[in-house]
Amino acid sequence: VDTIVPGGLLVVCLDDPGAAALAAWARESTSERIRVVGYGTDPASDVAVTEVVLDGLSSTARVKVGGHSATLRLPVPGDYNVRNGATALAMIDQSGLDMSAALPGLARAVIPGRMQPVDLGGGSPRVYVDFAHTPQAIASALNALNPPGPTRRTRVIAVLGAGGDRRVAVPRRRRPAARGRGDARVVTDARRAQEQEPHQIGELRRCPAGRGVSPGAERHELASVLVERQI
């Protein structure tokens, strides 16, 4: 907060307890220096996000700012992407620009590596690439693709990369995040091993889909195996 220039803006997600506490502190301590805007699912928020619809393919919500409301449509799944969209709209509104002018662009917005769809052609499974690199982010990404609910919508295969760090503790922390959210989970090596078989590849080879996979296989090779075998 101290790095925000006088007259600057702090946009905070009030759905997060820590962020909400920060917003309350900032409003009390820095109200004369910066503006604080909170967004969230509480209708009393400065930027209220309501009527959220998540279908595992895209996201829709109503966003209300002051006396104005608009429908936010995103071509990517996930409640956290709805929050990201609300953040963008809040900053646009607070900058004095027309919030509605940004809606068509957001409806087409796809960011490389951020729940990015990959078109493999007709008859192929849907594939998404996401740079989820923490247990919380992995859980959020898998929930986005198959929102929790009484009825499972689709099978989900999660291919998790170790990000170049081959220590056993890294994938072990990530496996629980994917547990219960995917029908199959594979932990891969982010870079080809030069001297020995990484433990991630060993884990893959112990599951049915990994039989016959060569030591040192890279992530795209393993993803191809999963698609071909339809585990």
Image (cartoon, rainbow, N blue to C red):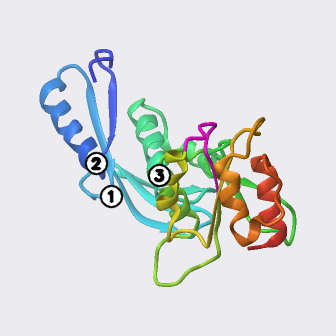
Which amino acid, mark 3?
Arg
Which residue, as the protein is rendered here, is positioned at the far left? 28
Looking at the image, is mark 3 or mark 1 earlier in the sequence? 1
> Left or right: where does residue 27 sit relative to residue 40?
left
Residue at point 47% right, 52% down?
173
Q: Secondary structure at mark 3?
A: helix
Q: Is residue 194 visible?
A: yes
> In the displayed structure, would residue 50 be above or below residue 109?
below
| Mark 2 residue type | Leu
Q: Do labels 2 and 1 touch, CB within 8 Å? A: no
Q: Nearer the viewer, residue 188 or 44?
A: 188
Indicate which disc residue 41 carries: 1
Q: Which secondary structure, mark 1?
A: loop
Earlier-in-chain disc, 2 versus 3: 2
- Residue at the spot of label 3: 173
In which quadrant of the rendered view does residue 63 lie? bottom left
Element type where label 2 sits in the image: loop
The amino acid on which the numbered mark 1 sits, given as a three-letter code, is Thr
Q: x%, y% of residue 104?
A: 62, 49
Between residues 40 and 201, which one lies in front from this camera angle? 201
Highlighted magenta segment, given as a residue range: 159-167
Name which residue lies at 59% across and 37% down: 165
The residue pinned by badge 2 equals 14
Residue 200 vs residue 82: left or right? right
Which image quadrant: the C terminus?
A: bottom right
Neighbours of disc 2 within 10 Å: few (<14), some (14-19), many (20+): many
Give the x, y percent position of residue 225. Answer: 82, 62
The spot of residue 76 in percent (x, y) is: 61, 56
Q: Which residue is farthest bottom?
A: 151
- Which of the pair 226/24 is nearer the observer? 226
Which callout, 2 or 3, points to the residue nearer the camera? Answer: 3
